[in-house]
Image (tube, coloured by chain):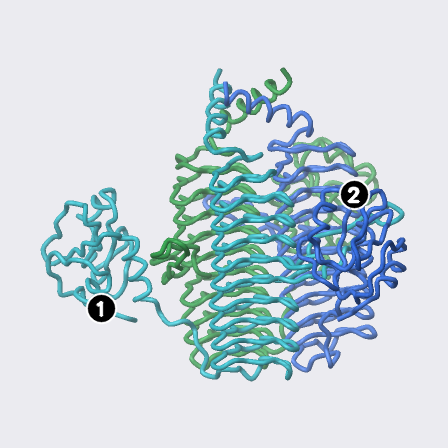
Chain colours: A green, B blue, C cyan
């Protein structure tokens, strides 16, 4: 466990210490649960009220809040407590599970695969033909990576994740648990007798940029032809579905249970709320936001916020909801 | 296959036998599909109409229903047919897949891990450093459990499940297939140049009580700091998302595809319907019910039922739906 | 990489070639991305406008479109460009990842399992007692198949998929990545003291017909008794939930994130849109369609289209949405 003095923490977050406390700090903790030896956060006067009963040894405090630490406790005043929290979480981050042997003897690695310097491959993982890993790639146990896939430097792939053939993945990505990359897109045509369904073969692949993070049990399907593409810096939450031939720009965010049907286009910095669904072939332009639970069936202009199902301008939808509430009571 | 005489079944369910039948009973079965040798269930007069054409040898019948068994068939009258069904399902339960060798030689178990008496670890599973398993824990094949995790007695973990480091799990839990426990919470902050997203490190963990069941492909994320917590007796269906720092009380039920964004609090006995989503930082107090498909964006008082998106009191929402239907027809 | 001359492609799609081009065709590609050596598709005049700037060597063109190829490029006129595209995708399909050894030495296969001719079992997969595989079944790495399961000829099971005991699977099926088949259904009863929940044992199984495809991270739960059944030709997308004792007829389609609660019945050819949910014990009759994002709480007659939550006739729901929009603006 890492520990810091309050003076060290003050330096880390570039703050100003008020009050004295000799306690050694062993963890950041939210104010309701903090005990002696913890540092907590007071970003607004709402949380300031909880300070009196808190056992925390110290608190990172927004400089605009007018409170005083008690005897034997310390405040660290900062301009931006959220940023200070992020800095502290990094400082206290425990080491990730590591391997004593870089390449576990039970891992099955095809002899045509190429591994960069410092790669680690966990127990019982499978790496197929002509797979190329950059430097310092970490593959945890029970991962499967299929033929002709390339993965950039420093990318981390957690257990249970499967990456199908011909996927291209950038550097500094994180694939969480049980992620599914490159399964066939969902497409069928009626059989010639009209009584059945014939599978449409998907010969495309998945291309993922740098610094992309994909949450547990999320899925990105391969393209029919061409590629399903996630731009640099996209952050995808758990249980998200990204259909075949969808294209995401830079730094898009998709929250849990959201989904893109096939051939959806997202610009840069698009934010998709939890459980929202986007119809196939729709374009959501840069900077647009889709509210949680929405169903989007038409293009969304740049920078606009939409919500509801069918999704429309957020303020218009609010008016509809208010009107409906009145109607129900009349 | 287990078999029972009708007299034995009558004793098991503490019922009263009416009519005689010498058939040996080999399985419970629903009335539409039941064949000779099956026992079926008649809980209401709706199902009584199907009895005439049923080939079942016997039926468990609610004592308040006024019907007579046919020649060579038997009824077993009981106060509570649902309870009797549950008792019979237990009696007929086939044995779970079992291992001839307790610890399969292909399992990779770190030498610092501690296993209680009677533990079983299936083929190709991975158990990391300082993991502690209680007595009679069953780990099926292809499971991954990371460092410093503790698991209580009698807990069963099915294949494909991954449990990340520092998770604490109680006794008598069941983790179904491809469950993801302890992946990083979903949190980012804008980069200092405003053009990208910086990952917020999540140093917390997941804490799961006793007798908790988690369905296939469901996810519980680790806390930012502190813990994501599931209280004793919680029952989580398939494809459910539980975001970082959410806290569930005792015996909460979450149905398939439902989700909690970060820092949601559920009291005791809360029921969340299928595909319902709860906004971050919302509290749903004890005994409240959220209808299927709802989107909850504000706290819900104890015992209240809400439905719709945005969710409101169920009766109020019904009135809104009726009003909207009228409006569409006018 | 497979290549064809334009004459060969013309024959494959049974079309009529217009214009001459000697380029060797190495891939089909959508018109926006196509380069020299690609064949593209022009199914409507919308895409015809993009032809002028396309670098494709050839295009499959709907015979009713009146355009001319440029110098050194070729058109192939066909009656049905979508069908021609499906034919070409099959022609260009790369080989699936294959194994140099049919049964990988790290696979753990119980000695009582029976494998047909030409079966392949990948690295670190597990096959339990009395499992029966037909001919040419492909099990990719890191799959787990439990006792007494039977799988028909030519079925393919991708990595991460887990199939629980006593499942029956037909021939020519495809199970994509991280699929969960046969986990316990979600059912509990109050404990006798009313303060807890008691698990209802699920002793049924899952029965899957021929030519069924199940998408990544989807789940099909076992029946309480009797079976959860998917008829021949059903196509299930990613992240779909099929609850215990649901019964699907022939050729049903369920799109991503959709779900059936327990004991739902679908007729033949039912189409369930993305993120739609169906309440338990509801019947959706043959040929009915459920729109994306709907919540269905009552039976749907054959051939009918419903949408919304609660779902109703699609045209009626459109009128409600129009009325609500007006109301919000008034």
Residue C219 location (% of width, % of height): 59, 57
Q: Nearer the viewer, residue C263 or B21?
A: B21
* Circle on res. B269: 2
**Disc 2 element:** loop
The quadrant of the rendering that contains the N terminus of chain B is bottom right
Q: Compared to A188, does B195 lie above or below?
A: above
Q: Is residue C327 left or right of residue A104?
A: left
Residue B12 location (% of width, % of height): 87, 60
Question: What is the quadrant of residue C21 in the picture?
Answer: bottom left
Q: Is residue C120 left or right of residue B246?
A: left
Binning the other alpha carbons within 10 Å of mark 1 as few (below 14), some (14 to 19) or many (20 upward) gives some
Q: Compared to B122, does C267 lie above or below?
A: above
Q: Is residue A186 visible?
A: yes
* Circle on res. C284: none
Residue at (48% x, 84% y) in the render: C101
Q: Chain of mark 2?
A: B
- The residue identified by callout 1 is C4
Residue at (53% x, 58% y) in the render: C231
Q: Compared to B209, does C139 lie above or below?
A: below
Q: What number of labels is visible?
A: 2
Q: Is residue C53 visible?
A: no
Q: Chain of mark 1?
A: C
Residue A90 location (% of width, % of height): 62, 55
């Amino acid at each position: 466990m890492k520990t810091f003095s309050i003076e060290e923490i003050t330096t880390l977050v570039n703050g100003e210490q008020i009050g004295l406390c000799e306690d050694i700090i062993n963890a950041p903790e939210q104010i309701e649960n903090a005990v002696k030896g913890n540092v907590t956060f007071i970003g607004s006067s709402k949380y300031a009220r909880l300070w009196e009963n808190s056992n925390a040894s110290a608190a990172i405090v927004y400089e605009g809040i007018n409170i005083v630490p008690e005897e034997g406790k310390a405040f660290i005043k900062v301009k931006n407590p959220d940023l200070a929290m992020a800095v502290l979480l990094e400082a206290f981050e425990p080491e990730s599970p590591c391997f004593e042997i870089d390449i576990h003897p039970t891992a099955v690695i095809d002899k045509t695969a190429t591994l960069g310097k410092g790669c680690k491959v966990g127990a019982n993982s499978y790496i197929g033909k002509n797979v190329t890993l950059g430097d310092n790639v970490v593959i945890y146990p029970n991962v499967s990576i299929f033929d002709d896939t390339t993965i950039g430097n420093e990318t981390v792939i957690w257990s249970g994740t499967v990456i199908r053939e011909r996927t291209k993945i950038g550097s500094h990505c994180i694939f969480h648990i049980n992620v599914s990359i490159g399964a066939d897109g969902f497409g069928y045509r009626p059989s010639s007798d009209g009584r059945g369904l014939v599978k449409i073969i998907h010969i495309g692949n998945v291309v993922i940029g740098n610094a992309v993070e994909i949450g547990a049990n999320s899925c990105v399907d391969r393209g029919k032809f061409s590629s399903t593409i996630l731009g640099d810096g996209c952050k995808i939450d758990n249980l998200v579905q990204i259909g075949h031939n969808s294209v995401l720009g830079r730094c898009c965010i998709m929250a849990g249970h959201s989904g893109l049907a096939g051939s959806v286009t997202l610009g840069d910095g698009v934010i998709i709320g939890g459980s929202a669904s986007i119809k196939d072939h729709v374009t959501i332009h840069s900077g647009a936001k889709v509210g949680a639970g929405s169903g989007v069936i038409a293009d969304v202009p740049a920078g606009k916020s939409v919500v509801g199902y069918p999704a429309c301008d957020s303020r218009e939808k609010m008016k509809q909801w208010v009107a409906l509430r009145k109607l129900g009571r009349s």
